[in-house]
Each structure stands twice: as structure tokens, then as C-alpha cells.
Amino acid sequence: MSAKRDYYEVLGVDRKAPADEIKKQYRKLALKFHPDRNNTADATEHFKEISEAYAVLSDDAKRQLYDRHGHEGVDGRYSREDIFAGAQGNFDEVFGRAGDFESIFENIFGGRAGGRGGDFGTKRGADRMYETTVTLEEVLRGKQIDTEIKKRITCTDCRGSGCNPGTGKNRCRACGGLGQIKQTRRMGFAAFVTAMPCSACRGQGVIVESPCSACKGQGNKKGKKFCSFKVPPGVTTGDYIIQGEGDEVPDGENGDLILRVRVKEHELFERDGKNIHILLPISIVDAALGRTIDIPTLDGKTTVKISSGSQPDTIIKVKGRGVPHIQQGGGRGDMHVHLVVTVPKKLNRTQRNLLEEFQRESNR
Ligand SMILES: [Zn+2]
Ligand SMILES: [Zn+2]
């Protein structure tokens, strides 16, 4: 009902602005309006507004939805909590993981960005991000990762119940256990019904009799968890989801771990899907006479035969020495050897004599 401002306008960027410009601009504004730094009355509101805009515009899928259908498109599909939960990694990117801003999200949005999500439907934990760089050799074999992930984990003191031992939860009297309070406002002919999360129970519908002192009744708390997984062979640069390895929510759905993979450029090989390409400089003499040469591959050496009379830009295909496809599995692609015929810049006396003889022979 309230007129929501255009997200691009809020961040002051062009509709076509690339992702990193949006990130830069958000960072600039967030530092300016962060309530810890900015005491003006509407700083918090403004911080919320730019954060929401960034949460949507930093997420490819949501940005597309917004571009096509505006606020309705996004709000119709995602709850506010979903929007922030989905963008957790993007905020981490701006502020650094576990940065100073963590507490601000807890204060402003009630729970780690999206972590609570409790108003309507099941609670869902926030997503976490793990970034890794893989070499082309690791693309061939896959990469085992054993690491600790910082996230909210189930409280061991109360086993996630949020209650001190021997105590329980009672239905919230303010909202009758619904977790929300409906308000009807008459404006002219129309009646507007708005549902707000109940503030007494923070949308949970229940009130913890005696909150667990270790987790303040949340059921989960900041911690670390060991996580072991394999980046599969054939991986490409992009984001992969490891379900349920994000923030733990004892009575809801765990968030996901977003695995952000960047495949490093190789100094010799260029990758093109399953195939890899290598440049092989050879002399004009080798091209003319032919030769067998040992060349490197991603796993050991192989021998290629250059046939006599090879022309510049000839491609020799070495079957099965590329990389696998992440989904198709099984076979590897090929290695393409591009012949780069080079002309010697310096000749010694003998080489010069021989080539001069070759020249005389050719021009006869
Ligand atoms: Zn606890
Ligand atoms: Zn309530």
C-alpha cells in the first residue's frame, strides 16, 4: 500500500548498471547511513531501504524478476526474510564475513538477515557462502574440501528448544499463537487489513517461559561446524548450492551453503567447455619437414606428430585429454594443439648457408 521507491532510484544507479557497480554504490551508501555512524532520525529507515534494494538487485534471479514485474513480482514471490536470506552472501561480500554489520542486521531486521523468517510459514536459516578457487588440474580430478563453516548452530545447552532445562513454551496470549496481529483500518470506503508479526512473541506464536541462557532462547547460536564435500570434476566458475549446510534452525529449515567456485586461468591451457586448447610454437623447418614433439597435458606428457607440410594455425586434436563435463560425467573432452609456426629471428652461418641453398633451390 505504501508507495515503494524504485530500487535503482534508491541506490542511485542506472537500470543497466553491472553487478560490481551496484555493490560499490551500496557499500558507499551503507557506510553513510549505517545507524552506528549516522544519528539522523531516518538513517535506520534509509539503511533498511537501501539494504532491501541491494538484496534484490544483487541477486540475478530476483533482479530479473524485478526488472520484468517490479515490486509486485518480487514481493509476490518472496517474503522479506527470503529476500535477505538469499542475499546473505552478497552482504558478506560487501562487509566482509562476520563484519561489524552483523549486529546491525540483528537489531534492525530481528535476527541475522533473514535468519528468523518466522512470521508466516516455516522458519528458514540464512544461507552461508564458501568461496574457493580451483586450478584446471583440479577441474580434472575434483577438489576435496574439509573446512569449518562459521554459522549459527543448534544450541547444545537446550538442544534447540530455546528453553532452560525443566521449562517449556506457552502459547502467546497477545496473538493467540498465530504469530501475527491483524489490523483493520478504514479509509473512506475501503478497509485495509494488514497483518503484522506479533511483537510480543516476535512472530513465533509461542513464548519461552525461561529462555535458555546460552542462546537467549533462540535455539541456535553463533558457532562453527566442520563441513566436508567434494567440488566435482568438470566444475565451472559459478555458484553451487549445498543444501542444509547453512544456518541451523532446530524447528525449521536449515539455510544452504552456497559454494562459490572460481576456476583459475591456466598458464598453458585455455578451457572451452570440455575441451582445452594449447598453443605450440614450431619452427618453419619443423612445419615443413614434420616432427614428433613431446607436449604437456593436464596429466603428464603426450607425443604429437606434426606431419610434413603443416600450415600455420593447423589444429591437432588429442582425444580424451580435455576435462570432464560436470553433468554428463564420464568421458573427457579433447585437447586442441594449435600450431604456431615461427620464423627464426637469428641464424648462424651454417643455418644461413643452408637456407640460402634452399632458397636457390626453390627459385630455380
Ligand atoms: Zn539454548
Ligand atoms: Zn504473539
Image (cartoon, rainbow, N blue to C red):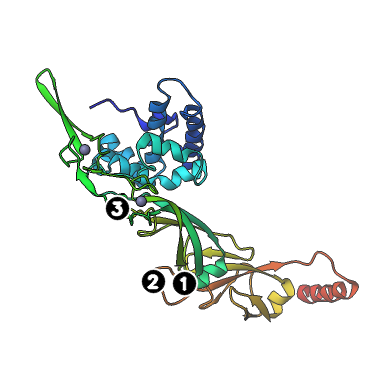
Residue at the image position 35 percent from the left and 53 percent from the top = 255
Residue 48 in sight in this render: yes
Q: Which residue is mark 3?
A: 161
Q: Foreground residue, 211 or 277?
A: 211
Q: Which residue is mark 1?
A: 324
Residue 65 in sight in this render: no
Please report whichever mark, 3 or 2, sits nearer to the chain's N-terminal start: 3
86 vs 193, left or right, is right
Q: Quadrant of residue 289?
A: bottom right
Work out which residue is located at the far top of the displayed protein and give it: 188
167 vs 345, left or right, is left
Find residue 328 and name its label. 2
Q: Secondary structure at mark 1?
A: loop
Residue at the image position 65 percent from the left and 76 percent from the top = 295
Q: Does 5 sit above or below residue 99?
A: above
Q: Foreground residue, 107 or 164?
A: 164
Instruction: Pinpoint residue 358: horizontal percent, then vertical percent.
Output: 80, 76
Instruction: Pinpoint residue 304: horizontal percent, then vertical percent.
Output: 62, 80
Residue at the image position 34 percent from the left and 42 percent from the top = 83
Q: Which residue type carries mark 3?
A: Ser
Mark 3 sits near ligand 1, with its Cβ under 8 Å away: yes
Q: Counting other residues with Cα less than 10 Å from the Cα at mark 2, is it few (<14), some (14-19), or many (20 or more)?
A: few
Q: Does 199 sit above or below residue 87?
A: above
Q: Foreground residue, 27 or 361?
A: 27
Given this view, does label 3 or label 2 mark the residue nearer the observer? 3
**Proximity of marks 1 and 2: CB atoms separated by less than 8 Å:** yes
Q: Quadrant of residue 65?
A: top left
